[in-house]
Amino acid sequence: MKSQVIAAGCVFGLVIVAAGIVGIAQDKIEPAPKIVDPGPAGGPPSDAIVLFDGKDLSAWRSGNGEARWKVEDGYVQVNGTGNVFTKAEFGDCQLHVEWAAPAEVKGNGQGRGNSGVYLQGRYEIQVLDSWDNPTYFNGQAGAFYSKFAPLVNPCRKPGQWQVYDIVFHAPRPRAGGGVEPGSFTVFFNGVLVQDHVPVEGSTTAAAFSGAVPKGPLMLQDHGNPVRYRNLWIRPLN
Ligand code: MG
């Protein structure tokens, strides 16, 4: 009995030593994860690039000059002056977007609170007032426009702030031709609506075929006074 206890103790000791060696080896291979201050709820975390902090559009441009959307009271509002683009370009990224459709409901379907968040200026996560507003499923809020409907519809009422948290991996050119699909994962008001769906073709003009390593983030002017605030991005490559 005594020898069994000693044997068990030895085995236990060896397991601890082995685990320690594995742990040390891992420390040598992998750097310690960087410390990131997550900031307040909704961020921005300390390592994010802030794209709009409620004050100005200095990180943005229009298609042909200065971005001219209306900035007031900590938000920016679509005003019919055209799409806006970030001056910087991004590839794989984590993106946080807060938006609100107009509190005063006008129009229906695609004509009600329509805007959009375009990764690389070409792959659209649809922004739409989807509170009691039927339209085609892959065109409602949280859809990868024209490709994938959201898994569920967690849209809040018009006028309320909505939150998108998007993980985007860009398609990549395949050696020998063709494109290796990228992916979208999207949380809408904290609810999973796109679960690692493939990103292959553009949701915009056919002129955007193939894959590019980086491109600007674009917010769509669809003629409806949609508001945005607290926009930040964490490049992943
Ligand atoms: Mg749109």
Image (spheres, rainbow, N blue to C red):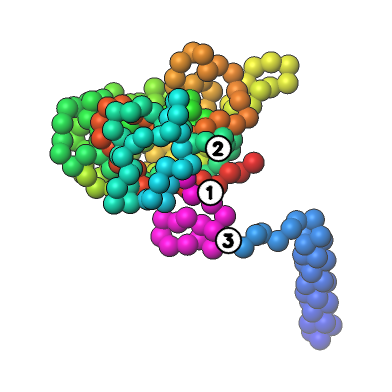
Specify the amino acid type for callout 2.
Ala
Amino acid type of the residue that numbered disc 1 sits on in the rendered structure: Ile
Which quarter of the rendered picture does the C terminus lie within?
top right
Check disc 3 and report the residue beneath it. Answer: 36
Q: Nearer the viewer, mark 1 or mark 3?
A: 1
- Expressed as whole percent of the image width and height from the top left, the position of residue 92 reads 58, 38
Q: Which residues are magenta?
A: 37-51
SS category of the residue bearing label 2: strand
Q: Real-space Cα distance between discs 2 and 3? A: 22 Å
Asked if residue 236 lies left or right of residue 194, the reply is: right
Q: Which residue is mark 1?
A: 49
Numbered tag placed on residue 130 in the rendering = none
What x and y, as percent, mark residue 143?
37, 31
Question: Which residue lies under the disc numbered 2?
Answer: 88
Q: Are marks 1 and 2 in contact (CB under 8 Å)?
A: yes
Q: Is residue 106 left or right of residue 59?
A: left
Judge from the rendering whether residue 1 lies leftward or rightward of residue 158; answer left or right.
Answer: right
